[in-house]
Image (cartoon, helix red, strand yellow):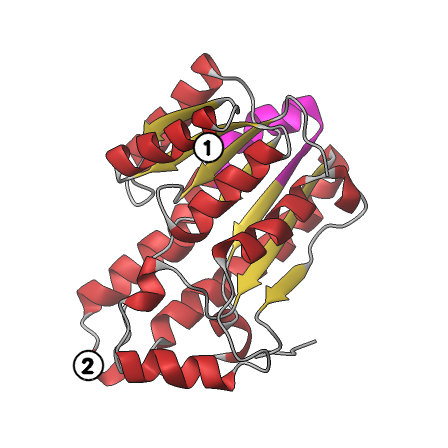
C-alpha cells in the first residue's frame, strides 16, 4: 500500500492511534503532518518519522477551537500543500456513569470527539473538492456501534462520527473523495491505561483474541482506507476489535 509523495494530515498525532497512523502513513511513503493540541508531542512524533527517513511536519491544533482549526488548515495548505489524506484521530474519554456526568463533561466529549472531526474535515474539504480526489478516514469507536457502559455520551459522539462519515461519503462521491470510518475496540493506548486495572483486565478477557489491539493494528486499517487498495470503497465502517464486536 504505497502512498509515495502524497500528503497526509493526522490529528491526535502526539500519541496512541494517531501517532501510530502518522508513522504507518510515513512508512507507506506519505509526507505527513502531525497535528495535536500537545505541540511538543506532535513535534516529537514528526521527529521520529524524520529519523526513520520520512518527511514530516508538526503543528499545534485544538480541534475544539474553530479559529485554531482554520489557522491549522491554512498553515498546512501554505507550507505543505493540499492533503490527499485526512485522518481525524483526535479523541478523548473518561469512564464515568452517565448519571454522574456534568453538562461540562458532555460538552467536552462532544466537542473533541464529534465536532472536532466535523471542523477539521470542513477546513480541508474545499481544496480536496477542487482537486477532485482525496481520502478522509475518521476514527470512531465500537462504542458508537454497540454502546459501552460508562461511556454513554462518548458512545453517542462516536455514533455521530459514524453517521457523519456515511452521509459525507454520499455527498463527496461525485467529487472523487472517499470517506470511511475505522472503529477501534480496546487498544493499548495511554487513554486505555488510565482506566482502573480491573476494568482493563475485564476488557482484555472479553476479547476473543484475549489481548488488546496494538495501535499499529488500527493504523494498518487507516492506511488501507488511505490507499488505492480501497479506491472503490466509501461510506464503510471497519471494526478493529479482535472479535469483541461483530456488528454488521
Q: Quadrant of the N terminus?
A: top right
Name the residue at the top extreme. Answer: 78
Q: Is residue 76 left or right of residue 210?
A: left
As helix, strand or loop, the secondary structure at mark 1 comes to helix
Part of the protein shown in magenta:
121-135
Dot 1 corresponds to which residue? 123
Q: Is residue 221 left or right of residue 16?
A: right
Per the rendering, the mark at residue 100 is 2
- In this rendered view, identify the residue nearer to me: 113 or 44: 44
As helix, strand or loop, the secondary structure at mark 2 comes to helix
Q: Tag 1 or tag 2, which sits nearer the N-term?
A: 2
Neighbourhood count class around disc 1 (C-alpha, 10 Å): few under 14, some 14–19, many 20 upward? some
- In this rendered view, identify the residue nearer to me: 66 or 224: 224
Q: Are marks 2 and 1 in contact (CB under 8 Å)?
A: no
Q: Position of residue 117 (x, y in %)?
A: 45, 47
Per the rendering, the mark at residue 161 is none
Amino acid at each position: 500500500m504505497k502512498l509515495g509523495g502524497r500528503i497526509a494530515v493526522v490529528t491526535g498525532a502526539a500519541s496512541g492511534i494517531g501517532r501510530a497512523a502518522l508513522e504507518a502513513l510515513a512508512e507507506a511513503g506519505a509526507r505527513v503532518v502531525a497535528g495535536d493540541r500537545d505541540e511538543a508531542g506532535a513535534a516529537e512524533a514528526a521527529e521520529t518519522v524524520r529519523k526513520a527517513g520520512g518527511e514530516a511536519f508538526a503543528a499545534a491544533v485544538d480541534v475544539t477551537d474553530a479559529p485554531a482549526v482554520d489557522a491549522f488548515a491554512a498553515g498546512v495548505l501554505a507550507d505543505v500543500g493540499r492533503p490527499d489524506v485526512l485522518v481525524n484521530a483526535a479523541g478523548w474519554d473518561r469512564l464515568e456513569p452517565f448519571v454522574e456526568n456534568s453538562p461540562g463533561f458532555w460538552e467536552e466529549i462532544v466537542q473533541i470527539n464529534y465536532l472536532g472531526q466535523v471542523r477539521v474535515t470542513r477546513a480541508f474539504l474545499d481544496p480536496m473538492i477542487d482537486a477532485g480526489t482525496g481520502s478522509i478516514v475518521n476514527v470512531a469507536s465500537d462504542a458508537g456501534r454497540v454502546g459501552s457502559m460508562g461511556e454513554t455520551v462518548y458512545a453517542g459522539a462516536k455514533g455521530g462520527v459514524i453517521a457523519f462519515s456515511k452521509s459525507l461519503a454520499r455527498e463527496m462521491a461525485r467529487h472523487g473523495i472517499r470517506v470511511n470510518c475505522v472503529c477501534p475496540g480496546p487498544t493499548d493506548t495511554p487513554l486505555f491505561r488510565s482506566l482502573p486495572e480491573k476494568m482493563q483486565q475485564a476488557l482484555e478477557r472479553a476479547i476473543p483474541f484475549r489481548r488488546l489491539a496494538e495501535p499499529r493494528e488500527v493504523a494498518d486499517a487507516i492506511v488501507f482506507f488511505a490507499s488505492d487498495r480501497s479506491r472503490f470503497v466509501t461510506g464503510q465502517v471497519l471494526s478493529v476489535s479482535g472479535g469483541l464486536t461483530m456488528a454488521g
